[in-house]
Image (tube, rainbow, N blue to C red):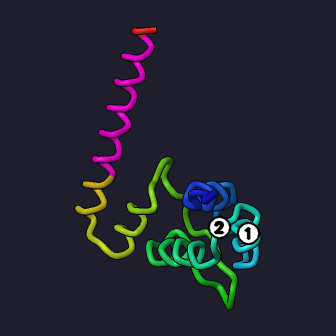
């Protein structure tokens, strides 16, 4: 069974205090416990560095510069890293619209029950 690694890494990193330094080995251990490939974890870590959530300190060591917004997706992080601010805002807007639609559907289901 494959596990979605993004919520795992997002929660791990957001659970740390700003300025906390952690190692790549910690991320790889977390990944191996959940059956996630190390290349997946490295890709996500690199996107976080390029989007200025993490900073490279030394070989295999990273510092948390700022916490990620609640509910941010990997796609949004990649857009921050490699896209424009407008692209990011469009993705956030689309995500929030999906969340509102999901809430509306849940309310309809609750009324039917």
The correct choice, above or below, for 71 with respect to 88 in the image is: above
User: Is the stretch drawn in magenta largely helix, strand or loop?
Assistant: helix
Say which element carries label 1: helix
**Image point (73%, 66%), residue name:** 30
Q: 92 left or right of 18? A: left
Q: What crowding class fits label 1: few (fewer than 14 Cα within 10 Å), some (14-19), or many (20 or more)?
A: few
**Image point (25%, 54%), residue name:** 90
**Image point (64%, 57%), residue name:** 1
Q: Is residue 103 highlighted in magenta?
A: yes
Q: Is residue 94 highlighted in magenta?
A: yes
Residue 54 x, y percent position in the rendering: 56, 73
The quarter of the displayed image where residue 87 is located: bottom left
Q: 4 left or right of 69? A: right
The correct choice, above or below, for 59 with respect to 38 in the image is: below
Residue 100 x, y percent position in the rendering: 34, 32
Query: Magenta part of the protein: which range?
Result: 92-110
Q: 11 left or right of 22? A: left
The correct choice, above or below, for 107 with respect to 66 in the image is: above
Residue 75 x, y percent position in the rendering: 39, 62
Name the mark on residue 91: none
Q: 77 left or right of 27? A: left
Q: Answer whether labels 2 and 1 touch (C-beta < 8 Å).
A: yes
The correct choice, above or below, for 50 with respect to 80 in the image is: below
The residues tagged by marks 2 and 1 sit, at their Cα atoms, a distance apart of 6 Å
Say which element carries label 2: loop
**Image point (62%, 69%), residue name:** 64
Q: Read off the residue under disc 2.
A: 36
Name the mark on residue 32: 1
Residue 34 x, y percent position in the rendering: 71, 61
For the view shown, which residue lies furthest in the bottom direction? 59
């Amino acid at each position: 069974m494959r596990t979605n690694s993004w919520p795992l890494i997002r929660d791990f990193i957001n659970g740390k205090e700003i300025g906390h330094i952690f190692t790549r080995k910690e991320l790889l251990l977390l990944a191996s416990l959940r059956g996630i490939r190390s290349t997946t974890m490295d890709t996500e870590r690199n996107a976080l560095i390029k989007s200025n959530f993490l900073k490279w300190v030394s070989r295999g060591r990273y510092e948390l510069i700022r916490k990620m917004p609640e509910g941010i997706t990997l796609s949004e992080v990649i857009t921050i890293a490699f896209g424009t601010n407008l692209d990011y805002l469009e993705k956030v807007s689309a995500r929030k619209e999906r969340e509102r639609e999901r809430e509306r559907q849940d309310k309809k289901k609750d009324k039917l029950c």
